[in-house]
Image (spheres, coloured by chain):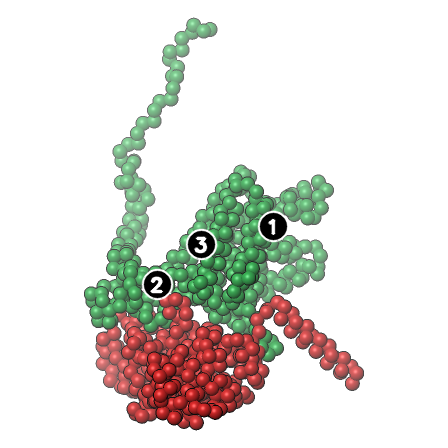
Chain colours: A red, B green
Amino acid sequence: MLKNKQTKVGKMKKTILSAAIGAAVLGLASAASAATLADVKAKGFVTCGGSNGIPGFSNPNDKGEWSGIDIDYCRGIAAAVFGDASKFKIVALSSKDRFPALQSGEVDVLTRNTTWTISRDSSLGFNFRTVNYYDGQGFLVKKSLNVKSALELSGAAVCVQQGTTTELNLADYFKANNLKYNPVVFEKEADATSAYDSGRCDVYTTDQSGLYAIRLKLKNPDENEVLPEVISKEPLGPAVRQGDDQWFDIVSWVHYAMVNAEEFGITSKNVDEMKKSGGPDIKRMLGAEEGTKIGTDLGLTNDWAYNIIKQVGNYGEVFERNVGPSSPLKIKRGINALWTKGGLQYGPPIR
Amino acid sequence: MANVDFTYVRKEMVAAREAPSNAKGIGHWLKVNLFATPRDIIFSILAIAFLAYILPSIFRFVFIDAVWTGENRTACTTVSQGGALPDGQYGACWAFVTAKFEQFIFGRYPLAERWRPMTVMIAFTLLLIPMLIPKAPFKGWNALALFILLPTVSFFLLTGGFGLPYVETQLWGGLMVTLVLSFFGITVSLPFGILLALGRRSNLPAIKMLCILFIEVVRGIPLITVLFFASVMLPLFLPDGWTFDKLLRALIGVSIFASAYMAEVIRGGLQAMPRGQYEGADSLGLSYWQKTRLVILPQALKLVIPGIVNTFIGLFKDTSLVSIIGMFDLLGIVTLNQSDANWATPVTPVTGYLFAGFVFWIFCFGMSRYSLFMERHLDTGHKH
């Protein structure tokens, strides 16, 4: 018993010692306890998991700053928590090390083009709720192959990116249809694209959003076409660790606030006007309703949604700026349109 | 004697006659070097044909068809790709490199603070040049400033000290990270390598075993494995919330590696020393450290200059492996910027890699030339 106690004390001492050494030598700390909001507030910024460069979602611009839909999501969280969209940091993560980074608390939220699947929700210990981009996997082929359907692709060499659900979907699809294929695997999108363009593979497969980016890099974009099959559902959204419902709610409602704002027609330009003269639901959302507790109940201030829209914009603006017509990608809204326009983006009521 | 006339003795040398016309000039050179035998003729023609085949298209890609200025991808794409160039033009997009140049050098270091790495780079160059010139004075002070003072001051200047705002290493990148990593690795690995090599040849069993263990273990694991382990596994084992600074992980990993490799290079030099040198030093009554410092090392190190520089060059290039842990060195930041949709063109990746390759080549070629110069400079005539 005594011995046991001693070892325990010894262990504790060791832990304290290593923590102290850690504090002295390594300096940096990001807490990963249950109260993520308190930790984030104490740090003074929110840490988001970003990518190694995904066009339109998270990529560096000419000034060396990150930009993209996922980055704007992160800025939205910063605006909601601090009232200042610049209080965020991005940790660049490859598709392989994004999950350990979230598990270990290196990042507070993973906003990295991540597909929501049941195993990631359950066994990895994450929580997903919002989807900031509905994607699906497609095939890009050379027109010269004369292929009209993915079912004719038996024996094809397929370029695919490593460690993604894309790779798994590809295997499932070809197995289910009894087709043979020859996967050519790359870690980086750019390398896979060059390989496809130079003829090393017959087919390129990735999410449809990625195919738009790849078209920009082809020597003869018109000689290639996207096959009609969409072989998977890829709901992309942010993930947080399980066990912190408050933080989970905040991250989710940042997206819903942006979607609702678009539905109400609130933009970053007219938000001040709308706050004064909008209808009751608009005033409620923007925190202008008297005696409202919507923001404070989330653990934020009541102007949280106002700050998001003022500094980052509504969902439509973010989409347009990063992947839509104002960007080189020129992706159509498609199923990412609001539910009122036949799409899937639907924000629960804010009341 | 004075009046003896040696008129038949020549007073000056006869001027050398010109080489016969068939043994000089470009024709002769070609004949001797390229077309001496039928086999030579075949190989020469094949080689020339190959060069004639690839060089013009490379030259065309890099210079003639290249785009030098532009704001975004439109400048570097043809009409069918959605740009401004005539169809069929296929050249490097140097406008991409121009637009991203500062990022390639400093990474995502904040714009307003970039004078800090600039200052460090200038100071580094100013201290390095006199260090490299054998005749420049004050070598001791120079070394002290370059290897001790500069890294210390740079540390505070780059991360934040002297009241400057803190810049986390996450934002460092580009050539700056490549140079920091390789300079640190080189500075640490040489002394540690010497100690490890001496330890491995030591007569004290404990020290010998430790050194052998260290060298063999480190040499047995690929650098990429250690970096990957440090980035993915380490955070899971550390207490909640503690994270290692990524640059520190890379610095430690790279230095440990370089030291182990350096130790083996230097051991090669030590083994090449004839026994007589050791015995001679012993017979003069020199202590172990005197013997090593005054007799053995100066000769052994000189022997292995090519090996040492080889390790340096390898280390310099290995630094690009840090992109595995989310640090963006020169190559990493070039690849990262290929994902910018504003610059997504068919030629952007090639252009980026050409630029990165050229910068790496400049540094490595510089190191290699300098080592040749040092070999000649130190060559005092006695070959073993």
| Chain letter belonging to callout 3 | B
Q: Which residue is mark 1?
A: B270
Determine whether the residue tagged by mark 1 lies in a helix, strand or loop: helix
Q: Which residue is mark 2?
A: B99
Determine whether the residue tagged by mark 3 lies in a helix, strand or loop: helix
Residues at marks 2 and 1, common chain? yes
- Using residue B57 as the reference point, say whether residue B100 is left or right of it: right
Where is residue B283? Give x, y as percent.
71, 41
In which quarter of the view is residue A289 placed?
bottom left
Q: Residue at x 23, y 78 (%)?
A: A143
Where is residue A144? Give x, y as percent.
22, 77
Residue A266 shows in the view: yes
Residues at marks 2 and 3, common chain? yes
Cα distance between the residues tagged 2 and 1 = 50 Å
Q: Are marks 2 and 1 in contact (CB under 8 Å)?
A: no
Residue A125 shows in the view: no
